[in-house]
Image (cartoon, helix red, strand yellow):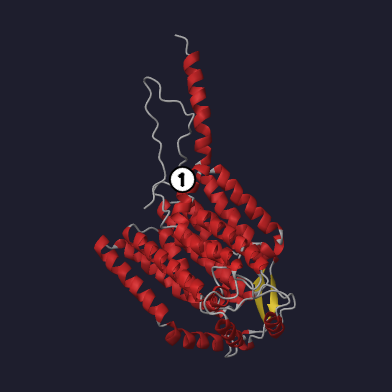
Amino acid sequence: MNSAPTDLVIARLAAVERPADLRAAKGYDQFFGFAAISLMLFVPQLKSLTPLLLLVLLVFHCVWRREDIPRLLRASSLYLLLPLFAATSWLWSVDPQASRYYGIQFLITALIGCIVGAGLDRKAAMRGVFLAFAVYAFSSLVFGRSVTWGGGAMGNSAFAGLAQAKNTAGDCGAVGIILSLTVLFDAIEERKPWLALLALVAMGVQAEMLVASRSSGAVLAVGIAVPLFLLWNVSRLFSKPARVVTGVTAILGIATAVLTQHIWLPPLVEQMSRAMGKDSTLTGRTYLWGRAAALIDEKPLLGVGYNAFWRKGNLDAEGLWRYAGITSRSGFNFHSTPTELLVHLGYAGLTLFVMVFVVLSILLLVRTMIRPDAIMIGWCTLLTYEVVRMPFESIGTGPFHYTTSLLAAGLVVSAGWLARGYRPAPLSNRPRRFRGEREPQLHTPRTA
């Protein structure tokens, strides 16, 4: 019997199936997570190439997995209200051109984070992000530098690595530790010894970065987040009712801590600062906050417009740059997320941010409570770390900043959680099954 027609049919079927299989490959998911976050980590080295390369990466993904874009936007719709509000602020901004320009950059950064959180396979995406921070840590160790710092008893220099400031190096070290722990636990469960070893080595380098950077805020935040990561993983041994109780307790505990942070956090930070030789003004932050309070009183509802304050020619901004010794007159903020939001987007922007963050964080905690795994616990831990830092750092709204994308990813990962990862929709020209062949099982994305 001549098998040529049968071979031809099989070849044609393989040719049709191959594009879908290639688009669904988890290797692409890992690459996207690695490439996107790496481009943001190496901004000082890549400079103006970063926005261009990130835009190319975003457009490529939207074309490569075009079938998944509607589902991705639905999963990310609540979070995207924040960058859309920021981009719209040009309508009332004191500098409409700046608000429109940076608002679009914020939206691009947020979309990339949403893809990492809701548009990729969870494990592959997390490993890609982990590898980005691991490469950055090793590169910083080899090619990094130290900067002068009035640290008193802690010495007069601090490690800045490849970053422009020591606090950024400390933050990269702290975030890297959380990601390395997450991948370490996941690799142990998956029985991947080489990945576990890499995570363990990377965590050691990142811990050295954190300590050498002398960043009290990062040390404090990771000191709170890592024990929670371990406790959440221990709770996986409990039955589902016990996990529910643990999850509810965690939600209530975190909410109470956030609402009462003005009572317990300042004394704790003051003790940390004193131990590390810092002054009682938190390195000039109290003066910044005092100036910000006057600006908020002038435009309390909608603020001055997204990124419209820190612009050359604004006398208030020029004075603060001069006070802080920022000769480049760029890359500065109010070192407080609520303050930054109030100045630029007013109480309306702050309310929107709080609403989005609370709703999506609760959804993430509930999902993790019901079906816990190391990856989801890792995202919970990362959000906890960022919450602790928010009173003393501007987080989650910086364009082309890795923290903005990671915050977006952590907030939407539960809304777009895929039980079986991404699968492209069936191609319109895919032939039907032939006699004697089984119908191929096509898995479409499912949201939880």
Q: Would you place residue 332 above or below residue 443 in this image?
A: below
Question: In the image, what residue type sits under mark 1?
Answer: Tyr
Residue 48 visible: yes
Q: Which residue lies furthest to the front in this view?
A: 91
Q: Would you place residue 349 above or below residue 12 in this image?
A: below
State the SS at label 1: loop
Along the line of sight, which residue is nearer the eye, 83 or 147? 83
At which x and y percent is residue 136? 62, 62
Left or right: 390 as drawn, with respect to 47: left
In the image, what residue occupies the spot 66% across and 86% down? 150
At which x and y percent is residue 293? 56, 85
At which x and y percent is residue 409? 49, 59
Q: Residue furthest top?
A: 1
At which x and y percent is residue 429? 49, 29
Q: Where is the N terminus found, in terms of image quarters?
A: top left
Residue 180 visible: no
In the image, what residue occupies the spot 53% across and 28% down? 15
Q: Would you place residue 241 above or below residue 422 in this image?
A: below
Q: In which quarter of the image is residue 441?
A: top left
Few, some or many C-alpha atoms within 10 Å of disc 1 (few <14, some 14-19, many ≥20)? Answer: many
Left or right: 330 as drawn, with respect to 297: right
In the image, what residue occupies the spot 38% across and 58% down? 373
Q: Quadrant of residue 216?
A: bottom right
How many discs appear? 1
Q: Would you place residue 125 above or below residue 362 in this image?
A: above
Along the line of sight, which residue is nearer the eye, 48 or 167? 48
In the picture of the structure, the residue carrying the numbered disc 1 is 422
